[in-house]
Amino acid sequence: IDAAVSAGVPRVVFCSSMGGTQPDNFLNTIGSRPDGTGGQILFWKRKAEKYALESGLDVTVLHPGGLLDQPGGRQVVFGVDDTLLQRQVRSIPRDDVAETMVQSLFV
């Protein structure tokens, strides 16, 4: 983020993760050590998002669900603050995430 600000980058698209509003989300257990260190991936992603948003850059943050190695072309659904976690289907092809990121540069 600091390098983007220094370089005068006009816009940043940040791919984060769905579930950042849930401290007990299973993704936060990845890399956790018995001594309590490590893990908390969603916590750190949210901190990075906040840092980016406060940097003065024009920032778009995406929170895709589970990434699929399948062809894209689905109708993409948008929500705020993890409201889509209530949906039965919360996964998305990587192709669709990439397309959404590229298209967001032109909004």
Image: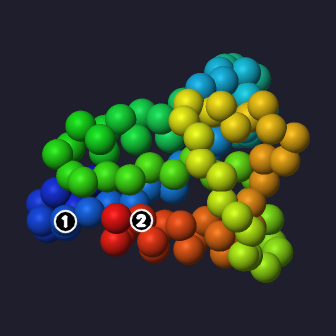
> Which type of secondary structure does the marked residue at label 1 adopt?
loop
Residue at 79%, 79% (x, y): give it: 71
State whether residue 28 is above or below residue 18.
Answer: above
Q: From the top left corner, tell me how far across and down residue 44 is, in percent.
A: 50, 36
What is the quadrant of the C terminus in the image?
A: bottom left
Residue at 65%, 70% (x, y): give it: 96
Residue at 84%, 47% (x, y): give it: 89
105 horizontally vs 17: left or right: left
> Which type of secondary structure does the marked residue at label 2 adopt?
helix
Q: From the top left corner, tell me how far across and down residue 2 is, in percent.
A: 21, 53
Q: Nearer the viewer, mark 1 or mark 2?
A: 2
| Mark 2 lies on residue | 104
Quarter occupied by residue 82: top right
Residue 10's tag is 1
31 horizontally vs 9: left or right: right
62 horizontally vs 9: left or right: right
Indicate which disc, 1 or 2, sits on the residue closer to the N terminus.
Answer: 1
Q: Identity of the amino acid at label 1?
A: Pro
Q: Residues within 10 Å of mark 2 (few under 14, many from 20)?
A: some
Q: Identity of the amino acid at label 2?
A: Ser
State whether residue 55 is above or below residue 37.
Answer: below
